[in-house]
Image (cartoon, coloured by chain):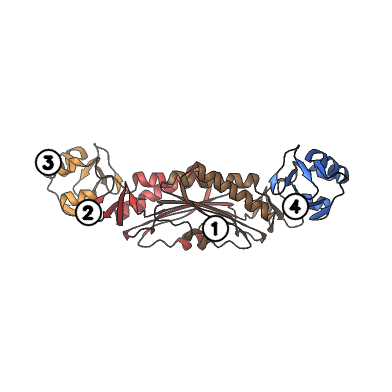
Chain colours: A brown, B blue, C red, D orange
């Protein structure tokens, strides 16, 4: 399996999709996370992503290997954004390509679920009058 | 011992790289956490605090060497 | 919910993705079907899609309404290609955008599964020495 | 009655729009299928053959009017 794993300022969605195309694959499933304008009924002005980049890339690599062991996928792309992000900006891109569609759907779902659980990246939301690190308060 | 701090943990410690005094060459993660909680009591308000050692999540009993790369990992919120 | 439902010669993947972006949505799940070079161990040279276009569009519209009734999705795109297609060409694009990711994954999976079951579109595969309509033989 | 034919059904009937003689103004889908099978026996080799009437899948008992838009729908294979 070929994989692309990156953390970058701006996610190039076109390039990400292009790298998922494979002649033996009939299906590509992607997930794109974008910045929402509301969270818990509070109006979001913008976001900031901080990353522990070396460890985040290593964890993403581990997740890719887990997915490749579990599903027959030929291409895998995982990209997370860092820095300041505005409403509707893409913040994460997950994509897998497989011969049959079920595997791509399952692998992509697994990768985004696990990324949100274990990859050391932190999101700070800024509202009209204050900011907060998400998940940092009980 | 140099300790990286991220997100809410960085806000609590006031720095992204803290120079934390540890007497022994080796210290257990759970003892290191006790020392950190004593110096930065607000860390106990986090829903969880993981410690990474050389880029891997450590267990409470992992032994940390003074020269390891250690980081404070508050709850992640990527994606 | 806003939806785009089309049958066209060439699927513009960039435009399709762009129309899924919505400020209230945090997640976009897409499925792209592409032409494989092998089917049942036979080397595929190219494909041809025939469509009963009026009925296919109506069926796709029905599926979109079913998905919108079942999941809270804010944007939906379903595009199927027609005519001659080469290996790796996109032949179908499904995308949904929702506030939370589970709904986008489930809705997109539902739409592609149902499309393959009920939308009147037929695929003819051409190999080195002959052609065949897929699913037309017991 | 004009009947559209697609995919493998078109190959069997030899045309994408066949002019099919029907005596009555109304005919049940199941009776229309019997007439079609009599004229084009190879249609019985298809794994399934649905009939659409005015763009909707019809049941065996649907009544078809001579002027309805009728089509032969062999197993679909889109996506």
Is disc 4 in the same subunit as disc 3? no
| Residue under the point 75% across and 52% down | B6
* Residue at 20 percent of width and 55 percent of height: D16
The residue where tag 3 is placed is D38
- Does mark 1 fall on the same chain as mark 3? no
The mark lying in front, picked from 4 and 3, is 4
* Residue A21 higher or lower than D47, as above or below: below
**What distance separates the C-alpha of mark 2 from that of mark 3?**
28 Å
Q: Chain of mark 2?
A: C
Chain to which the residue tagged by mark 3 belongs: D
Residue closer to the observer: A69 or C11? A69
Same subunit, labels 4 and 2: the answer reads: no
Q: Position of residue B37 (x, y in %)?
A: 84, 42
Q: Residues within 10 Å of mark 3 (few under 14, many from 20)?
A: few
Quickly name the residue at label 1. Answer: C21
Do residues under tags 3 and 1 come within 8 Å of each other at their CB atoms?
A: no
What is the C-alpha distance between the residues marked 4 and 3?
77 Å
Residue A114, located in which quarter of the rendered image?
top right
Q: Residues within 10 Å of mark 1 (few under 14, many from 20)?
A: many
Q: Earlier in the sequence, mark 1 or mark 2?
A: 1
Q: Answer yes or no: is residue D6 visible.
A: no
Q: What's the distance in space between the residues labelled 3 and 1, CA to CA? A: 53 Å
What chain letter is assigned to the residue under label 1?
C
Query: In percent of the image, x 38 and y 62: which residue is there?
Result: C10
Check residue C130 in the rendering and tell me which mark sits there, or answer none: 2
Q: Nearer the viewer, residue C130 or A31?
A: C130
The answer to whether residue A63 is seen in the rendering is yes
Provide the secondary structure element on which disc 4 rests: loop
Left or right of B57 on screen, residue B25 = right
Mark number displayed over residue B6: 4
Q: Nearer the viewer, residue B58 or C124?
A: B58
Dot 1 and dot 2 within a common chain: yes
């Amino acid at each position: 399996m070929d994989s692309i794993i990156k953390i970058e300022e701006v996610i190039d969605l076109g390039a990400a999709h292009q790298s998922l195309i494979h002649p033996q694959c009939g299906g590509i499933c992607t997930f794109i996370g974008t910045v929402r304008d509301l969270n818990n009924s509070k109006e979001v002005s913008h976001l900031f992503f901080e990353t522990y980049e070396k460890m985040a890339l290593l964890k993403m690599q581990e997740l890719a290997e887990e997915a490749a062991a579990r599903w027959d996928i030929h291409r895998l792309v995982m990209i997370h954004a860092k820095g300041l992000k505005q409403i509707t900006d893409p913040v994460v891109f997950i994509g897998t390509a497989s011969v049959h569609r079920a595997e791509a759907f399952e692998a992509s779902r697994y990768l985004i679920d696990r990324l949100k659980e274990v990859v050391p990246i932190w999101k700070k939301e800024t509202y009209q009058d204050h900011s907060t690190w998400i998940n940092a308060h009980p | 011992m140099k300790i990286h701090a991220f997100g809410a943990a960085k806000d609590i410690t006031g720095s992204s790289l803290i120079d934390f005094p540890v007497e022994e060459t080796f210290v257990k993660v759970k003892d290191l956490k006790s020392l950190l909680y004593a110096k930065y009591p607000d860390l106990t308000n986090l829903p969880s605090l993981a410690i990474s050692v050389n880029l891997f999540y450590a267990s409470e009993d992992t032994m940390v060497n003074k020269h390891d790369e250690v980081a404070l990992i508050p709850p992640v919120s990527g994606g």
